[in-house]
Image (cartoon, rainbow, N blue to C red):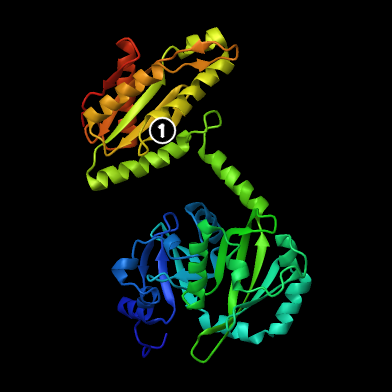
Amino acid sequence: MPSDLPVIDMPFFHSLFDHVSDAIYIIDPFTSHIIEANTQGWNSLGMTRSELLNQSVLSLNKDVIGISQWAEISEAIKEAGNFIFVGRHKRKDGSDYPVEVRTNYFIHNDVPYFVSIARDITLRAQHEDDFHNDDTIRAFALNEASDGLWDWDLSDDSLFLSPQWYRMMGYGPHEIGNPTLETWSSAVHPDDFSRVTEMLQEHLLSKSSRYEAKYRLKNRNGDFIWVHDRGLVVKRDNDHQPLRMIGLVLDITQSQLLTEKLFHRSQRDDLTDLYNRKTGYELFGQYLNVSLQQGQPMQVIMLDIDNFKSINDKYGHQNGDKAIQHVANTVPKLIRKTDLLFRWGGEEFLLLFPDTAQNTAFELTKRLLIKLSKIPFLTDDKNEVFMTASAGISGCPNHGCSISELVKSADAAMFQAKAQGKDNVCIAEIFQR
């Protein structure tokens, strides 16, 4: 090696890292947290270095939703060694911009890392939009797309709607004479209107690189269908004010209903339709975090049906299920709107009293058990069966500050109540650390 070549030291590489015009992020593959970034990395997002570090990639990337999707992407990067992703990064002010992200996987001192180089491709996207001819786009969309095409002239709010749009909405091809923006806005479900118009305005004001929304539209029969709507401003004046916008809308009613059904089933207990144990854990964690952060007491009640085996043996398992359903249907009517009930398993239920003192929880639970014991359920043979339940109470912070500690204490108190004759409520002993 020639001796006159300069020696490259670590400060040189740090300076190089900090002066690259693209944004560079060092990411933890497991947590998705940003460990380090260069100056362009936080400047491009409108943040300071301290605001950016330890944020999750999920909070910055508009097209990666949820830790499960991140896990899939993370595995793909590890397997390939590198990955190219085109998406949108979200700035601190809520606006977004298109990026091309190249991510590489490497291991240093036995610790795995991702290094992502993100390039702002706003100008490239604008050039690509200008490259296409409007008439060609419309002809292709009309002839080939299964979606309904809309073309909005902002100068007079007039709309061109394709034949697919009319068919999707149940109208004849000439049933709406001269459609305007009002034709569309009056059909949007009232509960969705504010959200959708806000997303539309963000794109018109160039705060987002495109408009995209899922919402409900009222069809000719007066029924609401779910649609996936997306669009793009294709023409602006010299002051960058929008003049024309084109988009496509797709009927997603069946897939949306299926998604909602599957989501509901994933959260709910099949027998009682209460939150199941998995969802209960998640909600428990949220309630507990609020309690700890705000210094508010929270009480946990383990509720268990007394003599449940005898009910099963005498009336059969089907009526045993009815007994569980009876408790699930009755208890929510006897508690406050702020309280949360979910099925813990078998004939056990867990009840959360947020922002509630221990003595208040004791009195509420005592009244609950008295009322429950006076309301019978009917068996298949129309027999009235009166039931009782036993309850144990634990509270944060007296009996612990974790789910496992609180559940263990409430469970022990519930068994103590059963040992004292059932149809009773006991408070757990103070948790010993």
260 in relation to 140, above or below? above
Q: Nearer the viewer, residue 203 or 25?
A: 203
- How far across and down, in percent of the image, does residue 58 sit? 45, 60
Q: Nearer the viewer, residue 242 or 219?
A: 219
Within the image, what quadrant is residue 316 found in? top right
Residue 137 makes an appearance in the image? yes
Instruction: Please give left or right for residue 224 compared with residue 289 in the image.
Output: right
Between 269 and 246, the one nearer to me in the picture: 246
Query: Circle 1 — which element?
Result: strand
Q: Is residue 29 left or right of 157 when viewed as pictured?
A: left
Is there any visible trace of residue 431 in the rendered image? Answer: no
Vertical relation: 224 (above or below) 316: below
Q: Quadrant of the C terminus?
A: top left
- Is 3 situated above or below 375? below
- Please tell me which residue is depicted at 52% across the width and 33% down the height of the picture: 273
Residue at 41% across, 27% down: 331
State the quadrant of the N terminus: bottom left
Q: Quadrant of residue 157?
A: bottom right
Write down the residue under mark 1: 341
Residue found at the very far top of the displayed protein: 314
The amino acid marked with disc number 1 is Leu
Expressed as whole percent of the image width and height from the top left, the position of residue 247 reads 63, 72
